[in-house]
Amino acid sequence: MFDGTGVSRRTRASRGALFAALYAAALTAQAQTAAAPSGFVGSNACKTCHADVWANFYKNPHYQAVAAGDRPPEQTGCESCHGPGQAHVAARGGKTTIGHAFSTMAPKETMEVCLTCHAKDLQKANIRRSEHTLNGVTCTNCHSIHRSPSAKFLLAKARSETCYACHAGVRAQFEMPSKHRVNEGFMDCWDCHNPHGTFTATWRMAARPPMVEQSAFNDEACVKCHEDRRGPFVYEHPPTVIEGCERCHYPHGSMNGRLLRRPVEFTLCLECHNGGGRGTRLAGVDLTTKDHNLLDPKYQRCTTCHVRIHGSNADGLFLR
Ligand code: HEC
Ligand code: HEC
Ligand code: HEC
Ligand code: HEC
Ligand code: HEC
Ligand code: HEC
Ligand code: HEC
Ligand code: HEC
Ligand code: HEC
Ligand code: HEC
């Protein structure tokens, strides 16, 4: 609202802004002269020869330090990743004159450069022992600092295409009749996976799930969207909590309805409820009772009666 003092306030504000700009410029100049002895020349020195890289750099989250101008030169702009540029500028280019020319570096070396700043991110706590790192995949396989087509996370390709570059076989699974809609763009691989590696899971203890992310309370990622299956229930169905959702469901896609691992539901149940007592790590899983005549089609769709198949708060037989 206009209150009569707005004009002068605005003038004061713009005078303030002008002063701040001058002050910042002075600081930058100061920082640059102070930096020279250690071989840092500041990002402005790179502009002329690498105009293409510079042109988009203001949009990059790594531009923050340049804009703020409050961090030491080894943590600011181009040289925060590429190392001191003085020798490179003096030589007017060259791959051997600059500290970190990534095109000549091994995957591990690249990772260490990025981790000088990113090692503290909780999400990357397991990066060094992740399947990706152990197999020579590094940050720049999935991230592109200068040429990212993705709006977020500086990804190397648009969204999940980043992953399909190497996991092409997975694409077909997301085209099956029952599926999660990754290819349609409703969700991404990283809704369930942490490509940087994960903590030891609280389910499926013996077999470490392939970088499947955990949601709150260390549950499997699935329950962050399918909250109604989270429990804890008064009456748990052990496979849900112990072995994980993928004991009965394919996570990506399936030819069977409800992403189930078997086309006929009761055959899934009979994998464990077969009286053999060895279907799970818990010995002695109950047989279906003798009242259940499995030749009678009525009994073949178990979940018409055992409706709370994931667990129940009311009934130990999951009938309600
Ligand atoms: C966050 C780290 C980081 C920052 C900051 C950074 N770069 Fe890079 N730069 C890289 C990586 C990583 C590559 C390797 C290319 C790739 O795999 O994406 C690269 C590649 C390059 C290349 C090789 C050719 C090319 O375009 O890929 C040039 C030139 C370059 N950077 C210049 C610059 C300049 C100039 C700046 C500052 C405006 C800058 N870089 C800031 C990480 C960085
Ligand atoms: C006088 C021109 C000039 C200036 C100034 C300059 N460069 Fe370069 N730079 C080059 C040339 C030419 C190449 C190509 C070298 C080659 O391919 O052999 C290059 C290559 C690079 C590469 C690529 C190495 C690779 O992996 O292939 C990086 C990174 C780089 N410069 C960073 C910088 C940074 C950071 C600055 C500012 C501190 C800077 N350059 C300033 C001319 C310049
Ligand atoms: C000098 C410190 C520093 C280095 C080195 C560095 N980063 Fe960053 N990075 C940052 C900061 C600061 C941010 C912004 C964080 C924020 O916004 O919370 C960032 C953000 C990011 C983001 C998030 C982008 C987004 O849109 O959310 C990615 C991805 C990233 N960096 C990857 C890399 C990679 C890959 C390397 C190595 C080539 C690297 N960084 C090297 C400091 C660094
Ligand atoms: C296998 C692919 C892959 C590799 C390898 C990878 N990233 Fe990522 N990164 C992603 C994806 C996908 C996202 C976005 C989803 C997410 O946050 O998990 C992301 C997100 C990020 C973010 C922003 C989100 C956040 O929470 O901080 C940063 C920063 C980042 N990565 C840095 C790195 C660094 C540094 C490395 C190497 C040490 C690296 N990444 C290796 C795929 C990868
Ligand atoms: C709905 C959650 C979910 C989504 C989305 C998802 N995954 Fe998975 N993925 C899993 C689970 C759970 C497993 C473990 C399955 C098992 O061990 O039976 C897995 C296993 C894998 C495996 C190892 C087993 C195999 O099939 O080779 C790869 C590789 C993989 N996923 C890649 C991807 C890629 C790439 C994407 C995105 C295009 C993706 N995943 C999206 C949950 C998901
Ligand atoms: C540069 C190639 C490359 C890219 C890009 C890549 N991966 Fe991988 N991924 C691998 C390799 C290599 C392995 C280990 C060997 C294997 O299991 O195929 C692997 C393994 C995996 C596994 C199985 C881990 C296990 O324990 O068995 C999952 C899940 C996975 N990647 C998910 C992803 C996701 C999600 C993305 C995208 C964010 C992605 N990958 C991007 C190369 C890649
Ligand atoms: C990011 C949210 C999200 C995550 C994480 C997620 N789902 Fe889903 N899921 C959905 C949505 C949304 C649907 C509805 C179907 C669609 O998208 O077409 C669905 C559908 C399903 C269906 C029914 C499919 C059908 O054909 O009727 C099953 C079963 C399922 N998810 C199991 C899982 C399992 C198991 C996991 C973990 C491995 C998981 N979901 C992780 C969002 C998610
Ligand atoms: C013991 C086997 C089993 C386990 C373990 C299991 N499910 Fe299911 N799930 C089923 C069956 C059977 C159905 C089909 C029920 C029906 O058709 O009414 C189903 C259906 C679903 C549906 C679709 C429901 C609908 O109304 O369309 C979702 C979503 C789902 N499960 C998620 C999960 C999640 C998340 C987990 C792990 C927390 C999980 N399931 C673990 C057997 C299982
Ligand atoms: C991976 C093995 C496994 C699968 C598959 C499985 N169950 Fe179970 N189920 C168990 C275990 C273990 C128990 C707990 C038995 C106990 O406490 O004596 C259980 C308990 C039950 C109970 C409660 C009975 C009781 O005495 O506690 C019912 C009902 C049941 N399951 C029905 C089903 C149905 C219907 C399916 C198919 C949709 C199914 N189960 C699939 C392992 C499995
Ligand atoms: C028409 C409804 C109905 C169908 C269909 C049905 N059940 Fe049952 N189920 C029951 C009832 C009611 C009980 C408890 C009363 C009893 O013991 O007969 C029960 C009990 C059980 C028990 C516990 C037995 C015990 O000794 O405590 C198991 C395990 C079981 N069912 C599994 C299955 C499986 C597996 C299927 C599919 C092949 C199935 N049920 C189909 C109604 C059904």
Image: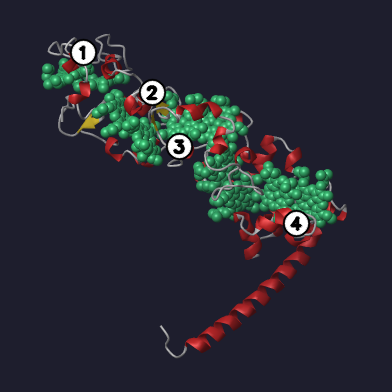
- Give whichever of 48, 44 is nearer the camera: 48
Cβ of disc 1 within 8 Å of ligand 10? Answer: yes
Q: Return the residue found at the far bottom.
A: 4
The label nearer to you, 3 versus 1, is: 3
49 vs 286, left or right, is right
Crowding at dot 4, Cα within 10 Å, few <14 / some 14-19 / many 20+, comes out as: few
Secondary structure type for disc 4: helix
Crowding at dot 2, Cα within 10 Å, few <14 / some 14-19 / many 20+, comes out as: some
Screen quadrant of the C terminus: top left
Please give the name of the residue rendered at 51% of the width and 88% of the height, measured from the top-left corner. 7
Q: Position of residue 256 (x, y in %)?
A: 35, 23
Residue 181 vs 119, above or below: the answer is above
> In terms of image quadrants, where is residue 306?
top left
Q: Earlier in the sequence, mark 4 or mark 3?
A: 4
User: What residue did someone put label 3 on?
Assistant: 182
Crowding at dot 1, Cα within 10 Å, few <14 / some 14-19 / many 20+, comes out as: some
Residue 93 vs 70, above or below: the answer is above
User: What residue did someone put label 1 on?
Assistant: 287
The label nearer to you, 1 versus 4, is: 4
Q: Earlier in the sequence, mark 4 or mark 2?
A: 4
Alpha carbons under labels 1 and 2: distance apart = 28 Å
Crowding at dot 3, Cα within 10 Å, few <14 / some 14-19 / many 20+, comes out as: some
Alpha carbons under labels 1 and 4: distance apart = 72 Å
Alpha carbons under labels 4 and 2: distance apart = 51 Å
Residue 12 vs 86, above or below: the answer is below
264 vs 174, left or right, is left
User: What residue did someone put label 2 on?
Assistant: 255
Question: Amino acid type of disc 3?
Answer: Val
Residue 51 marker: 4
